[in-house]
Amino acid sequence: MKSTFTQVIFISLSILRIKSYIKSGFQQPCDINILDDVCILSLSGFEVSYYPVDSLKMFYLNYHNCNSYINKTIFREKPYFKLKFLFPDDFFTIMMLDGTKGYSSEGRYYLHYAASNIIGEDLGYAETGDSLELASYIPPVVQETNVNHTILFLIFYQTEEMWLQLLNLTLLTRKNFNLIAWAQQQQRVKLCGPIAALQMLTSF
């Protein structure tokens, strides 16, 4: 886990890069870069929460337990993404991916969930509002492989509202989801980031 000071510097630079990108009229590069250790982007204001099955107590994944081992049974229901108001009037895309090395091809992920066009203000209340669901939720309990998996929770900044959707998703395309290639196919929208990220370890 990176130091709090390092995280603040890294996150501040990411936010400044996005603001500079907006100010430039979207002419500067605004790329996707998935770090090996996404916990450096575990903002104190970024939180993923679940209601475990047969429990009234909410479970939280945040800065304090990023990269911890968590029982897979907690994640049978779709998670809630919450991020404090960085850009309350702008759009965001959220994704839940399996980033386990060797589980999918290089640069590809298992896509558990994705939604776009989430307004920053809604994200601040862990709501999705009138968002566009790109991939319905599939929990990380679909098969038993006895392998430790790294599950990523990512938030990307959108330059504008997205109108293209992920169509014809199959088990094969989910397992070999090429995030960067898909983002590059969006002609009107650029994704920046992730600007916030969390990860957990589990086995299934």
Image: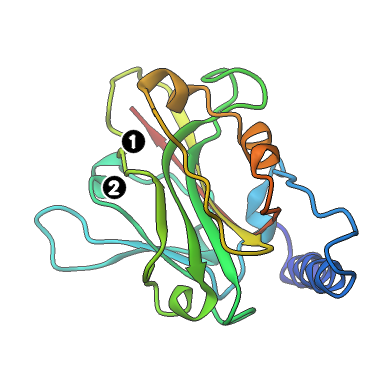
Residue shown at 63%/79% (left/top)? 87
Q: Which amino acid lies under the numbered mark 1 shown in the image of this protein?
A: Pro
Q: Is tag 1's residue or tag 2's residue first in the polypeptide sequence?
A: 2
Residue at figure coordinates x 48%, y 66% from the top left: 118
Q: How many marks?
A: 2
Q: Are marks 1 and 2 in contact (CB under 8 Å)?
A: yes
Please tell me in which quadrant of the rendered image residue 71 appears.
top left
In which quarter of the view is residue 99 placed? top right
Q: Residue at x 37, y 71 (%)?
A: 129
- Mark identifier at residue 140: 1
Residue situated in front as seen by the camera: 85 or 54: 85
Q: CA distance from mark 1 to mark 2?
A: 7 Å
Q: Residues within 10 Å of mark 2 (few under 14, many from 20)?
A: some
Q: Which residue is mark 2?
A: 75
Can you give x and y, in whole percent of width and height, for residue 54 in the image?
Answer: 9, 55
Q: Could you say whether the residue bearing mark 2 is in a helix, strand or loop? A: helix
Q: Is residue 16 above or below residue 38?
A: below
Circle 2: residue type: Phe
Numbered disc 1: secondary structure: loop
Task: Classify residue 97 as left or right of residue 192.
Answer: left
Q: Position of residue 67 (x, y in %)?
A: 53, 49
Q: Which residue is found at the position 40% from the left and 79% from the top?
A: 125
